Image: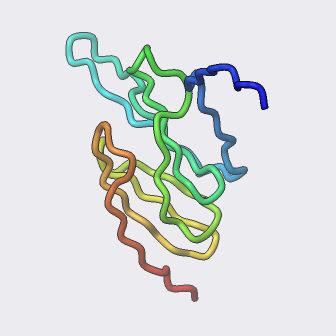
Amino acid sequence: MADAPNMAARLLYVAAATNRFSQAADIYTLSDSSSNATCPSLVAFGSSKLVALWDLDNEQQRGISETLPGSTGLITCVKFLAQDTIVAVNDAGVLTIWRHRANSQAGTAFSTPLARG
């Protein structure tokens, strides 16, 4: 067999499609007290059974910065409670809360089925 050529690979861009629910995404904005303006900082959205995060402040990064696993169903709703706390609900009615930490691949999740009535 001939020697295989040396090949290198690097990650250039990560993309993910958002789920088709009107509440499947949220943007956390930071306030600029000097101009009374707000600027987007972090986007979270449902992508299948994951919550995908896109850091708008990081100019070196293109696309999705990380995904938060843990949902057993399709994400239908995502909401920031604070910059580091994200709530998501899936199509099975399970609510999951993530505590996001910068430079971390996963947060801490707590899930509970929602009562149906």
Instruction: Give the colour scheme shown.
Output: rainbow
Describe residue 62's horizontal placement relative to residue 112 as left or right. Answer: right
| Residue 78, percent from left and from top | 50, 53
| Residue 75, percent from left and from top | 60, 59
* Residue at image point 68% right, 50% down: 19
* Residue at image point 36% right, 65% down: 109
Is residue 26 visible to us here?
no
- The residue nearer to you, when weighing 11 against 105, is 11
- The residue nearer to you, when weighing 6 against 55, is 6
Which quarter of the figure is the C terminus placed in? bottom right
Furthest residue in direction bottom, as rendered: 117
> Is 94 drawn above or below residue 98 in the view shown?
below
Quarter of the figure with residue 83:
top left
- The residue nearer to you, when weighing 94 against 4, is 4
Describe residue 96's horizontal placement relative to residue 85 as left or right. Answer: right
> Is 19 drawn above or below residue 102 in the view shown?
below
* Residue at image point 60% right, 32% down: 14
| Residue 80, percent from left and from top | 39, 48
| Residue 56, percent from left and from top | 44, 24
* Residue at image point 57% right, 71% down: 72
